[in-house]
Amino acid sequence: MEEKLTPIYSKKAILGFSIFLSALFGGVLLYQNLISVNKKKEAYIVLGISIVMTLSTVVIVNIPENPKSSLAYLCGIAGGSILSYYFVPKYFPNEELYPKKAIWKPLIIAVVITFCLVTAAIYSSSFENAY
């Protein structure tokens, strides 16, 4: 009898969230994959590494006097590649055998978080300009 595998987020989903949002978002997806297969220690390691990668991105993007969004995408590609092409094969060597989770829930959460951050940034800049 075949063992039923737990659905996980795909390598492509982890890479995409890392590139377009941040390595933290991709790291959370991989964290959830690892938690769902009872690899808690590995999950916390991946989450910690994705936090470090995200903080590194913030520092790297803000080094130039005029920050460039292309640096954020390059860091996202690098972080997502590490998560997708190093950690996923390491912890899910037969990743293609696992059923894939739909990305709608994390996508909606990401859109809501992004909306809140953009709204906060707009309102904070309008308050600065008012005084």
Image (cartoon, rainbow, N blue to C red):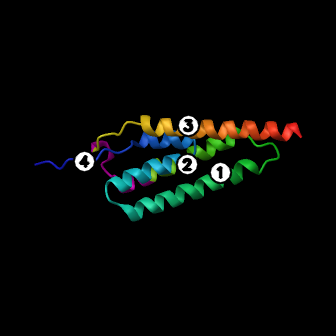
Asked if the magenta segment contains residue 33, the reply would be no
Does dot 4 land on a helix, a strand or a loop?
Answer: loop
Q: Which mark is residue 112?
A: 3
Magenta highlight on residue 90: yes
Q: Residue at x 31, y 55 (%)?
A: 37
Which residues fall within the magenta stretch?
87-97
Which badge, 4 or 2, comes first in the chain's sequence? 4
- Mark 3 and mark 4 lie on one chain; the one further toward the N terminus is 4
Say which residue label 4 marks.
Answer: 5
Dots 1 and 2: beta carbons under 8 Å? yes
Which quadrant is home to the C terminus?
A: top right
Tag 3: residue type?
Answer: Val
The residue that label 2 is drawn on is: 23
The residue under label 1 is which amino acid type?
Answer: Thr
Residue 52 image offset from top left, x and y in percent: 59, 58
Q: x%, y% of residue 1? A: 10, 49
